[in-house]
Image (cartoon, rainbow, N blue to C red):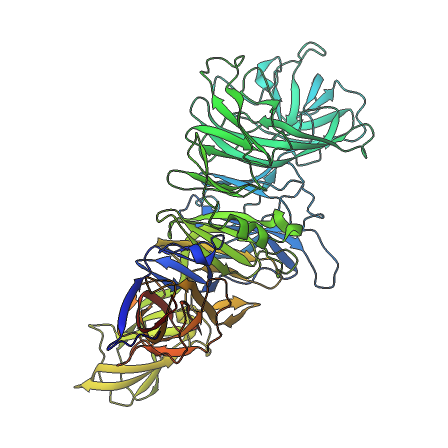
Amino acid sequence: MSIIRSSFQEARIPFEKMSYTPDVPSTNLGANEYNLGLNVETDVRGIRSVSGDQQIFNQIPANYEPMFITGGFRRNGEWWFVIGCVGADGSGMTTPGKWFAASATQTWYDITPTNIDTSQYAQNQNVTETWNGTVLLINDSFNPPFFWLDEDPVLYPTATAKMIAYSNTVPLEISDIQPVTTTTRKITFADTTLGLAPFTVGDQVTLSNVNPVAYNSSNATSGNYTFYTVTACTTTDVTISCSVTATYIPNQGGGVVAPRYSWNYNSDWTKVHAGFMRLYQTPNVGSILVAGNLTATPRVNPTDIQNYPVTVQWSQSFGLNQVPITWVPTATNVANQLEVPLRGPCIDAFPCNGQFFLCSYWDVVVFSPLNYSTTSAPIIGVKLMNQGRGLLTANCWANTDKLVYGIDARDVWAFDGQNFVGIGNQRVRNWFFDQIDPVFYDRIHMQCNTQKNQIEIYYPDRNATFGRPNKMLAYRYDLDVWNPPRDVYAATFATEAPVFGRVRQYFFLSATNITGSGTGAKFNVRLDDSTYTLVQVASPDVGTGYAIGNTMKILGTALGGATPANDVTITVTGVSSGAITAISWTGTAAGYDSPNYASRCITYIPGFTQVKMLQKDQGYNFVIQNAVTPITSFFRRDNIKLLKDYSGKLLVHRLLPETINLDSMGVPVYPSTGSVNIRVEGANSVGQAPQAATDITVNINADQPWAQMNQNAYRVNAIQVGNTSQTNIWMLNATTWQFTQTEDDR
């Protein structure tokens, strides 16, 4: 029997701390859960559309396809980006990969180490990195580790530093040292079976354990470290620049000659590389590098490649802003190598609460520092931490203020140094693993966006182009909520960095008259990206002899651009006794990439040629193939039940969205000038497909900011809110429903 109401009933539904939970049936969603969304996120007491992506810096050098990005501060306090690239000349042929670096004041330049093989770089290259202060260390899973030392900006005022790779040359025993000239010495190797000369001219080597001690690179008396330069080398001896006059007694003086930076110390291997490398800042001996999952090429039968998946080695200890000289264990350092009790290869590792955790696909092993007193004592205790937890692939973890987050095949987890806790189970886990393209699961990576208090999981779904991640799933750890997927453009890798804005200010600039004969006026100019946002007379230099209508120009070359493309033209619109009081201006600015160290964001690099870096959550547009595109966003909640009794049906008359606009920094904008599209659909049971309805556009700044409904009576309703825009960001804090109950079928 129908029930007639004399007036509308009303219900207000807030959207505070909303969490995306696609694993939960829409029939069982909680008050703060929803089941569908794209390019939206939970924010301050509401849900909003995401900000866009913004290109920064120059285009990556031609014919190179980025596969990795990282960033950090150098000694001069400037932020630098470093990218690793696959060689791709656009014709289907590949060339060796490269490593490039750039800053706000230095365009991309080649920092590739001279003695590594990059011919087999690919988009799925497993690269791990670590920053030790201002020094970057990288492992590419194909070569020995390499690093980017920080040069003194006084001695090296321009960017000249290239990366240096550790050497696969094994340290060699010495049988004799004899003078060749007053400044060179010939070192004879004890091993007479070498097939190739171990060093090349220009290499630097170290000497150790030599008697007389004057030859040794490490001088305990002076505290200095001497590196000798190779001037000639054969399979039996090496000649070095050296002026030590002490007499060496053949076959009695002993000693070892080694590369300046030693990595391989197994004489049965011609080369070896690791699957990962990380920095562990131990509380007992200082910093060490830890690398694992070794692959070696034997000296005999070099085609019989050998893999040691659970072998881990670590370097000698070293200080801040330094690198270890050697990974070779000696009587005077802490370097070592051992096997760890993991099922499956060691994939990656992370520090937490003073300990170091190594992960396979299945298990976790912990390195615990031991009380260290002598070099004959072990520095690390090793034990199995957890069976069943691990990492899906390298770079699938991120550190936050208190916890480490990661992904394995079971769930997304949080770890406090003692316990693993799943955070996706019965929320997003099943949906997420179903979305991943299983062919390219190894392309997943995770970042911590500290600016937004969230971890971000970049992954390829089945629509991704050759496995380049096209989606990002975020977890707000401060609110304990999940956000739905966000579109990203081929985000092959990402890093957290300062926000770079194309903002610049210039002061007391002179202008050239176009018309008129006034003199003496100077101007201050501010540019934001391609817009001259402010041009003002630089008091007290207001000039004399000017008249309304006079025009003048400031050359673009004085504003960081070119002329005439970036010239600014100024028109005098007000004068007082010949002095300028008001002006107008026109012109297109060149912009300038300058860091805002008061703000952070995630910067990612698309895995294609002819691209620029993209900083996320900036502006109102996405960027695809260097073209600006609008952002399509929507939030949907199904099976909303407004009546107490499920048997009742209601007729929705109006829906009033409490919506405002945000600026690019996420600050509310008043008045708000945008609009949103509202769709309300109904069904008579929770398992029934909702009856389709058309979108209703609702202006935010309006006298009647509601959607007027024209639907039949239903038991449950669905709401979808969103828009497609490249001019605004919308935020929805609540909706108010006006409805009438029409019947009760009991």
Residue 306 point in image, percent of width and height: 74, 31
| Depth check, front residue: 104 or 713 | 713
Dividing the picture into quadrants, the one containing residue 32 is bottom left
**Residue 198, percent from left and from top:** 73, 30
The foreground one among 491 and 435 is: 435
Using the image, determine if residue 296 lies above or below residue 595. above
Q: Is residue 128 above or below residue 431?
A: above
Q: Residue at x 46, y 16 (%)?
A: 372
Picture quadrant where residue 720 is located? bottom left
Q: Quadrant of the C terminus?
A: bottom left
Q: Quadrant of the N terminus?
A: bottom left
Q: Nearer the viewer, residue 644 or 85?
A: 644
* Outermost left residue: 577
Picture quadrant where residue 738 is located: bottom left
Please state the horizontal and vertical placement of residue 299, each as a whole percent of the image.
78, 28
Please say if 246 is above or below 121.
Answer: above
Q: Position of residue 286 (x, y in %)?
A: 45, 26
> Does any portion of residue 162 appear in the rendered image?
yes
Left or right of 480, for residue 297: right
Q: Residue at x 54, y 62 (%)?
A: 612
Q: Is residue 578 visible?
A: no
- Name the outermost residue toward the top: 252
In the image, what residue occupies the spot 73% across and 56% down?
Answer: 94
Between residue 288 and residue 166, name the one nearer to us.
288
Total marks in image = 0
Q: Is residue 234 left or right of residue 348?
A: right
Residue reaching furthest to the right: 301
